[in-house]
Amino acid sequence: MDHIVYVNSKARELENLIEGKKSMIIRGAQGRKLPHGRVSRGDMLYFLNNNGEAMIRAKGIVSSVYCSDKLSVEESFETIIRHQDKLQLPDEQFDMIAGKRFLVLVGVVDIEPVEPIFFDRSRFANIDDWIPVGDIAVLTVAAS
């Protein structure tokens, strides 16, 4: 399964993934939402910055997945702190996610830049920051 994953451009998440400073991404919510239960080891992730440019800039392979059960605020904080060496969340991102009841931690390996590929998000009803797409090849157009 291929997934489109938007990352925080202000926090330089994409650059930190490519440079190897970061090897895990996180999603947190008060209820179960994507990618909870929908991402698996071996899946391919395609990364875009959340700055509106709609260009896939890198890809990586899922090496591990942790989908939490309902967590207390303390358990949520502890889980994030325990993985902060791989997450490398700046304070603003940490504050935004810590305390959420459901967390999804996704380890990523073999992260590499790709020739920019335009992603047309209008084809999907889901307007979230994580979109399972099946096979990316049928959805993208190389940038000119």
Image: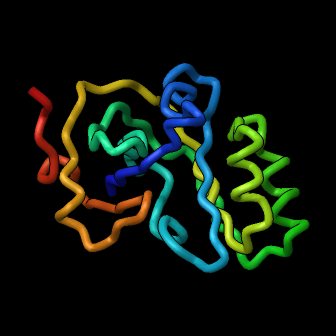
Drawn side of residue 24 relative to residue 121, left or right: right
Quarter of the figure that contains the C terminus: top left
* Residue 94 in view: yes
Q: Where is residue 115 in the image (x, y as percent from the top left)?
A: 24, 25
Q: Please report the residue visible at 33 percent of the width from the left and 31 percent of the height from the top.
A: 57
Quarter of the figure that contains the N terminus: bottom left
Q: Position of residue 98 (x, y in %)?
A: 77, 59
Closest to the observer, 43 or 49: 49
Question: Which coloring applies here?
Answer: rainbow
Residue 131 falls in image quadrant:
bottom left
On screen, 125 above or below 61? below
Q: Please report the residue visible at 71 percent of the width from the left and 35 percent of the height from the top.
A: 88
Q: Please report the residue visible at 29 percent of the width from the left and 39 percent of the height from the top.
A: 53
Residue found at the far right of this picture? 74
Residue found at the far top of this picture? 19
Total labels drawn:
0
Q: Please report the residue visible at 42 percent of the width from the left and 45 percent of the height from the top.
A: 50
Drawn side of residue 97 relative to residue 27, left or right: right
Closest to the observer, 84 or 100: 100
On screen, 56 above or below 30? above
On screen, 51 above or below 132? above
Q: Where is residue 19 in the image (x, y as percent from the top left)?
A: 54, 19
Drawn side of residue 76 relative to residue 64, left or right: right
* Residue 47 in view: no
Q: Where is residue 91 in the image (x, y as percent from the top left)?
A: 77, 42
